[in-house]
Amino acid sequence: MVDVIRQEASWDRAVARIPAARSNDPETSHIAAAEHTASGKRGTNVGLVIDLVRRLPGLTSAELARHSALTRHEIARRLPEAEEAGALRRGEKRRCAQNGTLAMTWWPST
């Protein structure tokens, strides 16, 4: 197995300060969130989502998942974190081509 070495990006520190679990979530969610952050997976996945939106702007989380190895759930959790870090912004809501529901579109920050 090859370990991937990733250089720290400008948004890494901002993402680490964003809570990964809601205050009213159970203790197990906070433990899992802390482990996900400490392992580096959360930051790596935020970076993958940012890159994905830069390549495919204007898609929903479900549409983005079709172009990624990440699940729609993981993408949907990382998008607001990337937004709070200043890397992405929300666009207009529209009908998602993947699942037919009304969904938020995502765009790179300008």
Image: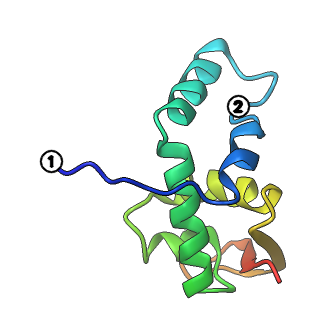
Q: Which secondary structure, mark 2? A: loop
Q: Which residue is mark 1?
A: 1
Q: Is residue 71 above or below residue 35?
A: below
Pointer 1 local density, CA inside 10 Å: few below 14, some 14–19, many at least 20: few
Q: Which residue is mark 2?
A: 21
Which three-letter amino acid code belongs to the residue tagged 2? Ala
Q: How far across and down, in percent of the image, does residue 57 sit? A: 65, 86
Q: How far across and down, in percent of the image, does residue 63 sit? A: 54, 77
| Pick the front one: 56 or 94 | 56
Judged from this view, the residue extending furthest toward the front is 7
Q: Is residue 63 above or below residue 42?
A: below
Q: How far across and down, in percent of the image, does residue 35 sit? A: 51, 26
Where is residue 105, by image quadrant? bottom right
Residue 47 as seen in the image, left or right of residue 103: left
Marks 2 & 1, CB-CB < 8 Å contact: no
Which three-letter amino acid code belongs to the residue tagged 1? Met
What residue is shown at x 69% (from left), y 60% (from top)? 10
What residue is shown at x 55% (from left), y 74% (from top)? 51
Residue 79 numbered mark, or none:
none
